[in-house]
Amino acid sequence: MKAELVFLGKRVDMAPRTHRQTMVILIYAGLAALMTAFWLLDRWHTSGVYMIFATIIINRLFFGGYNYGGLIKPFNSRAPRTHIDPPPFLVLGLRLYRPEPDERDYRNDERELAQRDHAHYRAYQAISVVLVVVWFLCSLRLTMPRLTSFLPISADALMYGLTLAATVTALTLPQAILLWTEPDMPDFEPEN
């Protein structure tokens, strides 16, 4: 796990657990607000896809895990693909910081692999509860369609919203668990 995050050209110290926990809370609050805004905008008819795109971008910028970037090393332990750097004026204009990849940046040791596996185990227990609720609503809808008529929104919209929330959670929860539970990192000196 990285001890600092570079966001908009500024270094943010993520060594203390409280900083990481605050970031996780802010990200999930932002995702909940975005999901609510999309519901008010068009009842997720076309904006549901944008919710998934926003989640992928958050993984890329903040969490990592499934993507390169963010605080968590990639789960797959593979080296990043070689890329062509943007022109220097673009790097300076956008304040991008891209250090040269080091083998330690993407290889997971045994402790990190065990932590990753445990985080996935805990995350998917929570997601399975949401899927059971979706299954229950689907079974009610199929067996007793009139029973779901008391809901303030249609059963289909409710199932879609729960499925969308479960998808967003599935993409982010293992990394959030790792960031939330990892103890404070030792003091470090940021690179110049």
Image: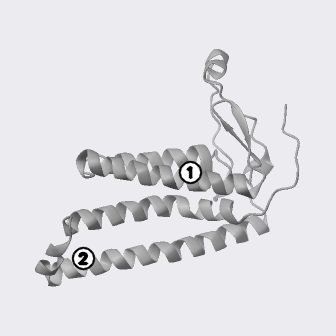
Quadrant containing the N terminus in the rendered view: bottom right
Circles 2, 1 touching at the beta carbon (< 8 Å): no
**Identity of the residue drawn at 63% across and 31% down:** 8
User: Reading the chain from its start, which is encountered first: label 2 or label 1?
Assistant: 1
Q: Is residue 80 left or right of residue 52?
A: right
Q: Which residue is mark 2?
A: 138
**Closer to the camera, 45 or 153?**
153
Q: Quadrant of the C terminus?
A: top right
Q: Residue at x 53, y 58 (%)?
A: 172
Determine whether, in the image, residue 106 is placed left or right of residue 187: left
Identify the secondary structure beneath mark 1.
helix
Q: Residue at horizontal 34%, vertical 47%?
A: 37
Mark 2 or 1, closer to the camera:
1
Question: What amino acid is at disc 1?
Answer: Leu
* Displayed quadrant of residue 179: bottom right
Q: Is residue 73 visible?
A: no
* Image-quadrant location for residue 101: top right
How far apart in space, not on screen, are marks 2 and 1 (Cα)? 32 Å
Residue positioned most to the top? 89
The spot of residue 31 in percent (x, y) is 46, 52
> Residue pushed farthest left?
146
Reply above or below: 170 against 73. below
Q: Report the disc number at residue 47.
A: none
* Label 2 crowd bin: few (<14), some (14–19), many (20+), radius 10 Å: some
Secondary structure under the numbered disc 2 in the rendered image: helix
Q: Which residue is mark 1?
A: 26
Q: Amino acid at mark 2?
A: Cys
* In the foreground, 84 or 75: 75
